[in-house]
Image: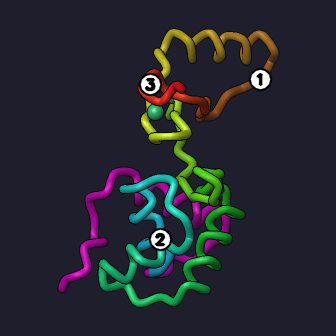
Amino acid sequence: MPVTFAAGSAGVEQIMDRAAQAGMRRTRACRAVVTVLARDAGLSAAAVHRRLADEGVAVDLSTAHRVLARLERAGVVQAVSAGGSIGYRLVRRDVHSLVCRRCDREVSVPAAVIASLLAHARRSGFEVSDTALLTFGSCQDCEP
Ligand SMILES: [Zn+2]
């Protein structure tokens, strides 16, 4: 089966550029892990490893762990606790969302809200290069 990691997944190249700027080599395993996480946020290292195997990318579990750890150090992946285990998601820029911890649903934060944040930054003499805001909680459907 052909490997489908060539191109197309939104933001993968941007993430790879940021990882490279942080000193990571653009390995096939690295690109594959980023592509998997671009499709599905919050996967555990074991789940990432299974997806890679499904896609025909042969890396062992310890390599998957190592790549995730490197991506995390490079600041492009963050570990989040999801349902009692550790999941990984890409750190995206200029994304502002409310994120449900239970169902992973994301609701965009309106631009006006971010504008007031940026205005506050300016008033504080802070020059903003980019922003990313994830606010975690429970969505309406998941509230007990
Ligand atoms: Zn929810």
Q: In this image, 1 relative to 76: left or right?
A: left
Residue 48: mark in rendering: 2
Q: Residue at x 66, y 71 (%)?
A: 70
Q: Main secondary structure of the magenta part?
A: loop
Distance of label 3 from label 2 (alpha carbons): 26 Å
Q: Residue at x 30, y 78 (%)?
A: 55
What percent of the width, then of the height, locates residue 101?
55, 39
**What segment is highlighted magenta in the picture?**
1-28
Please, what is the three-letter code of the amino acid marked with disc 1? Answer: Phe
Q: Can you tell which of label 3 and label 1 is closer to the viewer?
A: 3
Q: Can you tell which of label 2 and label 1 is closer to the viewer?
A: 2
Q: Quadrant of residue 87?
A: bottom right
Q: Quadrant of residue 134?
A: top right
Question: Residue 24 magenta-drawn?
Answer: yes
Please, what is the three-letter code of the amino acid marked with disc 2? Answer: Val
Name the residue tied to disc 3: 108
Question: Residue 4 magenta-drawn?
Answer: yes
Residue 126: mark in rendering: 1
The 10 Å Cα crowd at callout 1, few under 14, some 14 to 19, many 20 or more, is few
In which quadrant of the rendered image does the N terminus lie? bottom left
In the image, residue 138 sits, relative to residue 87, either above or below, namely: above
In the image, residue 61 sits, relative to residue 98, either above or below, namely: below
Query: Please, what secondary structure does the residue beneath circle 2 have?
Result: helix
What percent of the width, then of the height, locates residue 13?
41, 59
Task: Name which of mark 3 and mark 1 comes first in the sequence.
Answer: 3
Task: Name which of mark 2 and mark 1 comes first in the sequence.
Answer: 2
What percent of the width, then of the height, locates residue 5?
30, 72
Distance of label 3 from label 1 (alpha carbons): 24 Å
The 10 Å Cα crowd at callout 2, few under 14, some 14 to 19, many 20 or more, is many
Q: In this image, 85 relative to 4: left or right?
A: right
Q: Is residue 66 visible?
A: yes
* Colour theme: rainbow
